[in-house]
Image (tube, grey):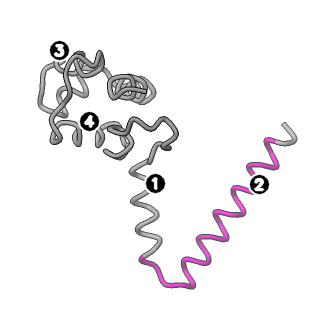
């Protein structure tokens, strides 16, 4: 998937308009349109801002590897905060997450 295709796909998933993205990045809506059509490539600074508003990593956005998973920046930041907790607190959080995932999978299996 090209850079433009990724921007378009994620922007639409996030229910953002080209104007929303353009306003955050500080460029025109026409520039965002050209990025999405792969007519032009954003500068590194603008690509980073686009990644931020879309909530993905710059690596994901710029990579041509379609197998690279989307990195949710909010989730990544949460994980960093969890790593700063004491070992006992990390273990507690891990148990809670594991239980939630198990319960969710069980609900899906019986739905």
Q: Tags 2 and 3 in contact by the CB under 8 Å rule?
A: no
Judged from this view, the residue extending furthest toward the right is 110
Mark earlier in primary sequence (3, 4) = 3
Instruction: Compare residues 27 and 3 and report the one nearer the observer.
Output: 3
Instruction: Establish if 101 lies above or below 55.
Output: below
Q: Is residue 68 magenta?
A: no
The quarter of the displayed image where residue 76 is located: bottom left
Q: Position of residue 41 (x, y in %)?
A: 20, 27
Mark earlier in primary sequence (1, 4) = 4
Instruction: Establish if 62 lies above or below 95.
Output: above
Mark earlier in primary sequence (2, 3) = 3
Between disc 2 and disc 4, the foreground one is 4
Magenta stretch, main secondary structure, is helix
Instruction: Establish if 78 lies above or below 87.
Output: above
Question: Which residue sits at x=84%, y=36%?
Answer: 111
Q: Tag on residue 30?
A: 3
Q: Disc 1 and disc 4: Cα gap in Å?
A: 18 Å
Badge 3 density bin: few <14, some 14–19, many ≥20, Cα 10 Å: few
Question: Which residue sits at x=13%, y=20%?
Answer: 28
Q: Disc 2 and disc 1: Cα gap in Å?
A: 20 Å
Mark earlier in primary sequence (2, 4) = 4
The residue beneath circle 1 is: 75
The residue beneath circle 4 is: 50
Badge 1 density bin: few <14, some 14–19, many ≥20, Cα 10 Å: few
Query: What residue span does the magenta drawing correspond to?
Result: 84-108
Instruction: Compare residues 101 and 38 and report the one nearer the observer.
Output: 38
Total tally of numbered discs in the picture: 4
């Amino acid at each position: 998937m090209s850079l433009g295709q990724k921007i378009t796909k994620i922007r639409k998933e996030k229910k953002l308009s080209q104007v929303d993205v353009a306003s955050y990045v500080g460029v025109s809506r026409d520039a965002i349109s050209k990025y999405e059509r792969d007519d032009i490539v954003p500068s590194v600074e603008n690509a980073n801002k686009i990644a931020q508003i879309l909530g993905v990593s710059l690596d994901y956005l710029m990579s041509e590897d379609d197998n690279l998973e989307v990195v949710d920046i909010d989730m990544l930041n949460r994980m960093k905060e969890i790593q700063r907790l004491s070992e006992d607190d990390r273990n507690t959080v891990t148990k809670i997450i594991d239980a939630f995932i198990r319960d969710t999978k069980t609900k899906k299996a019986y739905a």
